[in-house]
Image: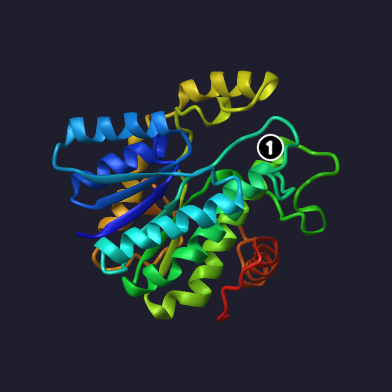
């Protein structure tokens, strides 16, 4: 039975993806920060599919020490029960903020959770992914288009704009996937980004306030249920022959920003390695 790790797996897109993949017989390792939400998610999965294989791990991925800790727990699980192999990692956890907020490391929170958490977790789980010729999937957004990385002010601590921070973090998801493919495709590892489209979830209502909370409450009503984008994650995991594309929407390849280049990906890798105090190696 192939094992898949999903972050942000207790609600929204992450939970619906877990449901879809357990139906296909995958063993799901979910990561989320609320114990009660994890318990509710597992109950829902088992109520729909009593034979589902799912285990939840608690972690606040906003903080790098938590990413490292949960990665160690997952690695121990994989070594003990899965021959040290990880078939896929879905870096889905994300956030929206209304104002400038930082992590314990002093990093802007949208950049920290939407990009750095997945960057660090992927590095820690890379040996298990290599062993299984695994797949890495990021939750992206069409909002990665029409923006450039602010290399001189990547945390946007000067004149902070929450929408700019979100859009930049989604561009970083694209560049991270591009950089992974440049480095590890020949090893059998492939990285993808899924554009879920406008989805009716609570991402814009969590720890936001005022205008962002109000606008998202109106906007999400026009979104599709999270079960719709879940089909694309399932599609990328179910294909026996590794799909060749990078950016997918509704199970089909989609054009992406011209900013997604190897040069920009390498620059982001170097910066992210420094911010996480790690080194991927192999360019």
Looking at this rendering, what residue extends furthest in the left direction? 51
Left or right of residue 141: residue 196: left
Residue 273's quadrant in the figure?
bottom right
Note whether residue 144 is visible: no
Q: Position of residue 152 (x, y in %)?
A: 82, 58
Quarter in which the C terminus is drawn:
bottom right
What crowding class fits label 1: few (fewer than 14 Cα within 10 Å), some (14-19), or many (20 or more)?
A: some
Residue 209 vs 120, above or below: the answer is above
Residue 185's quadrant in the figure?
bottom left
Q: Position of residue 31 (x, y in %)?
A: 42, 45
Q: Position of residue 135 (x, y in %)?
A: 38, 63
Residue 130 vs 234, above or below: the answer is below
Left or right of residue 211: residue 25: left
Note whether residue 264 is visible: yes
Left or right of residue 219: residue 210: right
Numbered circles on residues, count: 1
Secondary structure, mark 1, is: helix
Identify the residue at horizontal 60%, vertical 55% (top origin).
116
Quarter in which the N terminus is drawn:
bottom left
Q: Position of residue 165 (x, y in %)?
A: 70, 43
Task: Look at the image and name its color scheme.
Answer: rainbow
Identify the residue at horizontal 66%, vertical 66% (top origin).
277
Identify the residue at horizontal 64%, vertical 71% (top origin).
266
Q: Which residue is mark 1?
A: 163
- Of the pair 134 and 28, the residue shown nearer to us: 28
Identify the residue at horizontal 52%, vertical 76% (top origin).
183
Residue 30 vs 162, above or below: the answer is below
């Amino acid at each position: 039975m192939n094992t898949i790790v999903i972050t942000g797996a207790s609600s929204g897109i992450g939970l619906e993806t877990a449901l879809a993949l357990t139906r296909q017989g995958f063993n799901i390792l979910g990561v989320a920060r609320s114990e009660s939400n994890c318990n509710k998610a597992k109950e829902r999965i088992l109520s729909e599919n009593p034979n589902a294989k799912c285990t939840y791990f608690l972690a606040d991925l906003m903080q790098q020490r938590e990413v490292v800790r949960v990665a160690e727990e997952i690695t121990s699980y994989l070594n003990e029960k899965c021959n040290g192999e990880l078939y896929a990692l879905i870096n889905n956890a994300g956030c929206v903020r209304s104002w400038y907020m930082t992590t314990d490391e002093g990093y802007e929170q949208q950049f920290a959770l939407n990009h750095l958490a997945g960057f660090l977790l992927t590095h820690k789980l890379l040996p298990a992914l290599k062993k299984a010729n695994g797949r890495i999937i990021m939750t992206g957004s069409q909002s990665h288009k029409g923006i450039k990385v602010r290399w001189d002010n990547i945390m946007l601590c000067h004149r902070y704009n929450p929408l700019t921070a979100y859009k930049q973090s989604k561009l970083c998801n694209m560049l991270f996937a591009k950089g992974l493919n440049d480095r590890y495709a020949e090893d059998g590892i492939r990285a993808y980004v899924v554009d879920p489209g406008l989805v009716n979830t609570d991402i814009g209502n969590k720890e936001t306030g005022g205008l962002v909370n109000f606008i998202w409450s109106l906007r999400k009503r026009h979104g599709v249920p999270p079960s719709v984008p879940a089909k694309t994650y399932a599609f990328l995991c179910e294909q026996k022959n590794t799909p060749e594309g990078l950016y997918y929407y509704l199970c089909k390849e989609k054009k992406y920003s011209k900013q997604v280049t190897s040069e920009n990906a390498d620059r982001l890798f170097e910066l992210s390695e420094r911010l996480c105090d790690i080194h991927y190696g192999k360019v």
